[in-house]
Amino acid sequence: MFMAQRLTKTPEPLTNQVPAEGPTLVIASTAETLEEDIAEGHEPAGGKLDEMNNRASEMLEDAQDRISEAYDQAKSRAAYAYENMKQKSVEIVEQARVRAHYWRDEYPLQVIAGVAGVAFLLGVGLRIWRSNRYE
């Protein structure tokens, strides 16, 4: 019922969008009518178009400047992130190398046993995979 009332209601006129007073845009066909319009206080279309073109050019330049700044900022952030990741990965690899040397020097038999166990399990896994592949 609420929807029926809403659909049947007529819209009010858009009175607040019409300017009450102000310069009007006049397109003159001859020089005489252009001079008459300027004398009467009407603004010719050419001046308004030039003003709009200038404003559009300024807005375009501002947009290009903002895009350029955003691109430069994104580029510098990406470079910083790349360098940061590169540095962290180098640190991780260095820590792993130091740990491997420590284990190799302090626990040589356990390292050999671990490598042998991994090799054995890898061999069993490859054999199972090969036998299942040709069935």
Image: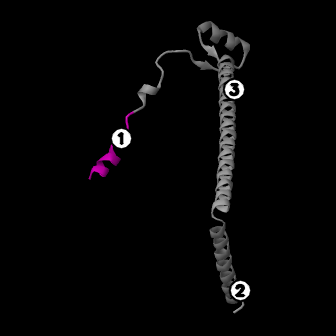
Q: Mark 1 or mark 2: name the one nearer the start of the chain.
A: 1
Residue name at image x 52 percent, y 15 percent: 22
* Residue at which label 3 appears: 61
Q: Nearer the viewer, mark 1 or mark 3?
A: 3
Find the distance from the CA under tag 1 to the CA under tag 2: 80 Å
**Kind of residue sitting beneath label 1:** Thr
**Kind of residue sitting beneath label 3:** Glu
Q: What element carries label 1?
A: loop
- Residue 83, by quadrant, is top right
Q: Mark 2 or mark 3: name the one nearer the start of the chain.
A: 3
**Kind of residue sitting beneath label 2:** Arg
Mark linked to residue 130: 2
Is residue 101 inside the magenta stretch? no
Q: From the viewer's perspective, is residue 106 above or below residue 64? A: below
* Residue at which label 1 appears: 10
Q: Which of 28 and 25 is in front in this view?
A: 25
Q: Which of marks 2 and 3 is in front?
A: 2
Is residue 10 inside the magenta stretch? yes
Q: Which of 33 and 1 is in front in this view?
A: 1
Count residues near mark 1 (Cα–Cα under 10 Å), then give few for <14, some for 14-19, many for 20+: few
Q: From the viewer's perspective, is residue 4 above or below residue 63? A: below
Count residues near mark 3 (Cα–Cα under 10 Å), then give few for <14, some for 14-19, many for 20+: few
Across and down, in percent, residue 135 comes to 69, 93
Mark 1 in CB contact with mark 2 (< 8 angstroms): no
Across and down, in percent, residue 49 comes to 67, 22
Q: In this view, does 103 lie to the left or right of 3?
A: right
Residue name at image x 66 percent, y 83 percent: 124
Q: Which of 37 and 58 is in front in this view?
A: 58
The range drawn in magenta is 1-12
